[in-house]
Image: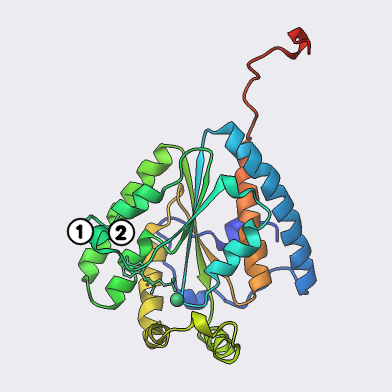
Amino acid sequence: MKNSDRLYRIKPKETVRLADFPAEATGHFTREDEALDELQRHRKRLDQLQELFAIDGRHALLIVLQGMDTGGKDGTIRHIFSGVNPQGCDVTSFKVPSPLEARHDFLWRAHYAVPPRGMIGIFNRSHYEDVLVVRVHGQITGKQAHQRMRDIVHWEEMLANNNVIILKFFLHISYDEQTRRLQSRLQDPDKRWKLSAADIAERKLWPKYQEAYEDVLSRTSQKTAPWYIVPANHKWYRNAVISRVLVETLENLKLRHPKPSVDPAKIKL
Ligand code: AMP
Ligand code: MG
């Protein structure tokens, strides 16, 4: 999966048509177990890199996960971060805004959840819901959505100027794959709880959501806060792609230990 980065990263101002991105892609993998081996390697590396990232302390890492219902946001977090020290990671799940949140500007709760330097923060849904779900439901106009997207771009730029590294992943599944996943939730007594009437209603709005996502992906990918469109029909490929981007990003930072405050040669125990 060399060059996964360039393959799925959206360039600034690139016009995105989701139909051009096959959700069932598996890159150079022909078998699931090859991808699982790779994920396993990435997980180990990520654990080492996270420790160094925390010690180095110069940057924060913000990972944004977006996708349609059943797209695999929870599974991505579980599979990729299961080996990482929980002290170095924070997950924030964005739900319908509380009455207090709704009285603030839409970035208020997101800004509060941005990780501090040395930490990895994962947004399970994010400030992007404020240009997706509310737009699809007609609570804001297209014009307002575009204004918000400009605000998001500026805000993310400001974060990047303050050493926040931002990676945004759109988990791209097909409509048929969502059908299969909803079916399996219906049939599996252990998964049924995940399903709500709202999920079924949202599914009817699939084309509107895809359009809203295309607009977001076309307008808000930036060099310092890129979007990746991750083929996510196959969970193992999704995990291999995302974990690779994370490992590559952290490796490129040239993380280092700070200079020791003591001279080991001068210490006698
Ligand atoms: P889940 O991810 O299944 O826990 O569902 C969370 C729900 O909260 C989804 O239906 C989201 O669309 C909704 N949600 C998250 N953020 C917002 C927002 N800013 N405005 C409206 N609904 C939101
Ligand atoms: Mg849900």
Q: Amino acid at mark 1?
A: Arg
Query: In the rendered image, which quarter is residue 140 located in?
Result: bottom left
Of residues 19 and 87, which is closer to you in this image? 87
Q: Which mark is residue 178?
A: none
Q: Could you tell me if residue 230 is visible in this image?
A: no
Q: Residue furthest front?
A: 269
Q: Could you tell me if residue 113 is visible in this image?
A: yes
Looking at the image, which residue is at 57% across and 84% down?
A: 181
Q: Secondary structure at mark 2?
A: helix
Looking at the image, which residue is at 52% across and 77% down?
A: 70
Give the image location of residue 38, x and y in percent.
75, 60
Label 1, on which residue?
Answer: 103
- Binning the other alpha carbons within 10 Å of mark 2 as few (below 14), some (14 to 19) or many (20 upward) gives many
Left or right: 127 in relation to 74: left
In the depicted structure, whether residue 264 falls above or below residue 140: above
Label 2, on which residue?
Answer: 149
The span from disc 2 to disc 1 (Cα, nearest Å) is 19 Å
Display colour scheme = rainbow
Looking at the image, which residue is at 68% across and 47% down?
A: 47
Q: Amino acid at mark 2?
A: Met
Give the image location of residue 134, x and y in percent.
28, 72
Quadrant holding the N terminus = bottom right
Quadrant holding the C terminus = top right
Left or right: 41 in relation to 201: right
Give the image location of residue 231, x and y in percent.
58, 71
Give the image location of residue 50, x and y in percent.
63, 44
Left or right: 142 in relation to 80: left
Q: Residue furthest top?
A: 266
Of residues 137 and 4, which is closer to you in this image? 137
